[in-house]
């Protein structure tokens, strides 16, 4: 039996770790750390630092190469095949390192519940017949880090919030009946395609990290600045993780 611990680690700041996360890491027999190539070496370096800082027992830490998604294939098909490949790598590591079962931990950026596929990949292993339990240790999400950094509430008073992706926003536009959008996984600055009238934006990159970058203001005034800053930061670091909140003034009728 594999006891799989999916541990939310926040957005890159070691201080985001909860006591529950530290306890779970030290209870694990094995922690697997994914390598995503040289361009994103900062991500595994942060995980290595977290492990070095908090592990005090016999937990073994092993790194593995994460499969690469086919960027040229249709999105949903490419993601499904990518998740299948990741599940296959997990299964290989489990068979090699925990042949008699045990506690396996994976350190999940942010929280496993929010725009992260770790839980879906774990389901693939169970569907393939691997005896496994899953425990989720919640972590600070990028949305929490964003609103904290800007010192703003996520929602307007008694108003809804829609969490979506840049892809959905680009394909479908601003949804009806909601004035606040939290946008994730947007590599194309989709806010540029929106009418800026009455819209404010709060943007953040590398949230919680030493090189955190923040921009906020009326979309018409700061959109170009965000696009330029995002390009500059990505060129400097080789990768970027960012998110933003959009809020428009409700139309009164």
Image (cartoon, helix red, strand yellow):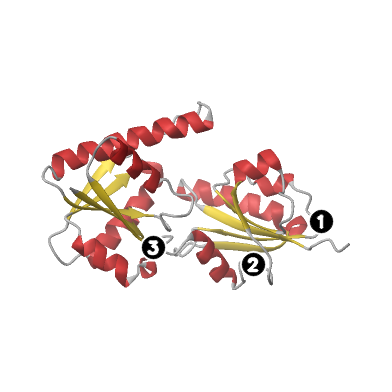
Which secondary structure, mark 1?
A: loop
Residue 154 as seen in the image, left or right of residue 4: right
| Horizontal and vertical percent position of residue 75 | 52, 32
Rounded to the nearest angstrom, the CA distance separating label 2 from label 1 is 19 Å
Can residue 53 be seen here? The reply is: no
Using the rendered image of the protein, determine whether residue 124 is visible from the camera's viewpoint. yes
Quarter of the image holding residue 6? bottom left
Q: How crowded is mark 3: few (under 14 residues within 10 Å), some or many (20 or more)?
A: many
Mark 3 to mark 2: distance in Å?
A: 21 Å
Q: Which of marks 3 and 2 is nearer the N terminus?
A: 3
Q: Residue 8: which quarter of the image?
A: bottom left
Q: Which residue was labeled with disc 3?
A: 138
The residue identified by callout 1 is: 197
Q: Which of 127 and 165 is in front in this view?
A: 127
Q: Which residue lies furthest to the right in this view?
A: 253
Give whichever of discs 3 and 1 has the lower sequence position.
3
Residue 171 horizontal/vertical position (percent)? 67, 38
């Amino acid at each position: 039996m594999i006891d799989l611990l999916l541990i939310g680690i926040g957005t890159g700041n070691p201080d985001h770790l909860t006591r529950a996360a530290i306890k779970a890491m030290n209870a694990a027999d094995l922690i697997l750390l994914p390598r995503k190539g040289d361009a994103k070496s900062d991500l595994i370096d942060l995980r290595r630092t977290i492990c070095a800082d908090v592990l005090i027992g016999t937990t073994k830490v092993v790194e593995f190469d994460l499969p690469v998604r086919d960027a040229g294939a249709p999105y949903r098909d490419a993601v499904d095949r990518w998740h299948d490949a990741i599940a296959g790598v997990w299964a290989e590591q489990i068979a090699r390192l925990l042949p008699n079962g045990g506690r396996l931990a994976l350190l999940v950026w942010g929280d496993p519940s929010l725009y992260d596929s770790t839980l879906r990949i774990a389901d693939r292993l169970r569907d393939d017949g691997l005896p496994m339990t899953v425990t989720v240790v919640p972590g600070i999400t990028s949305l929490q880090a964003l609103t904290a950094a800007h010192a703003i509430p996520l929602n307007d008073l008694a108003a809804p919030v829609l969490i979506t992706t840049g892809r959905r926003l680009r394909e479908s536009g601003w949804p009806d009946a909601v004035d606040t959008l939290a946008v994730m996984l947007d590599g194309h600055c989709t806010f540029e395609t929106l009418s800026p009238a009455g819209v404010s934006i709060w943007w953040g990159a590398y949230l919680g990290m030493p090189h955190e970058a923040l921009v906020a203001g009326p979309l018409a005034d700061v959109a170009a600045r965000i696009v330029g800053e995002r390009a500059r930061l990505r060129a400097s670091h080789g990768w970027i993780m960012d998110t933003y909140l959009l809020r428009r003034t409700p139309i009164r009728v």
